[in-house]
Image: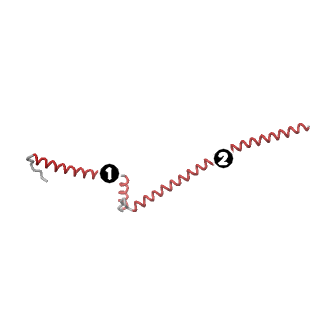
Amino acid sequence: MTMSKIENLDELRAQIAVLKEKVVVQEYQVRKDIQTLRDDLKPSNIAWSMLSSLTGIKLNQGNSLRAGIFNGVSSIIQRFALKAEKELESRVYKAIDTIFERLSNFVNGFAGHEAKRDERKDHHDASSNTEYTK
C-alpha cells in the first residue's frame, strides 16, 4: 500500500484506523512467535529435538517411542526406589534386632546377678555349715 498525501481529517482518521489494525495483527504475530520460541527453548523440547536430529527419526509428543522411553525411565526409577526401600527396611530390622538384643542382655544381666548372689549365698551357707561341724 502506497501512502498518499492525507488532505483532510476524515482521511487521517481512516489511515489511523488502518494503522491500528496493522498494529493489532503485528502484536498478535509477535506474541505467537514469542510463545513458539518459549516452547522451543523448554529443556524437554530441546532434548527431543536433539534426539530427533541424532537418530534421524522425527519425534513428537504423541510418538509411541517417547512413551516407551518414559516407561523405561519410570521403570528404572521404580527399581532404584524399591532397592532403596529394601535397604532401609534391612537397616531398620537390624536396628530393632540390636535394640532387643541389648535389652535382652540387660535383663539377663540382672538375672545373672541374682544367680551369682544365690551361688555366693549357697557357698557362704556351705562354708558356714563346715565351720560349725568343726
Q: Quadrant of residue 102?
A: top right
Q: Quadrant of residue 66?
A: bottom left
Residue to which mark 1 is pinned: 38
Residue to which mark 2 is pinned: 101
Using a 10 Å C-alpha cutoff, classify the residue at mark 1 as few (fewer than 14 neighbours), some (14 to 19) or many (20 or more). Answer: few
Q: Amino acid at mark 2?
A: Glu
- Is 7 or 33 nearer to us in this picture? 7
Q: Secondary structure at mark 2?
A: helix
- Residue depicted at 48% across the width and 57% down the height: 76
Whether residue 64 is situated above or below residue 25 in the rendered picture: below
Whether residue 24 is situated above or below residue 130 in the rendered picture: below
From the top left corner, tell me how far across and down residue 129 is, in percent: 87, 39
From the top left corner, tell me how far across and down residue 20 is, in percent: 18, 48
From the top left corner, tell me how far across and down residue 64 is, in percent: 40, 62
Q: What coloring was used for the rendering? A: secondary structure
Q: Quadrant of the C terminus?
A: top right
Cα–Cα span, label 2 and label 1:
61 Å
Residue 101 horizontal side relative to residue 2, left or right: right
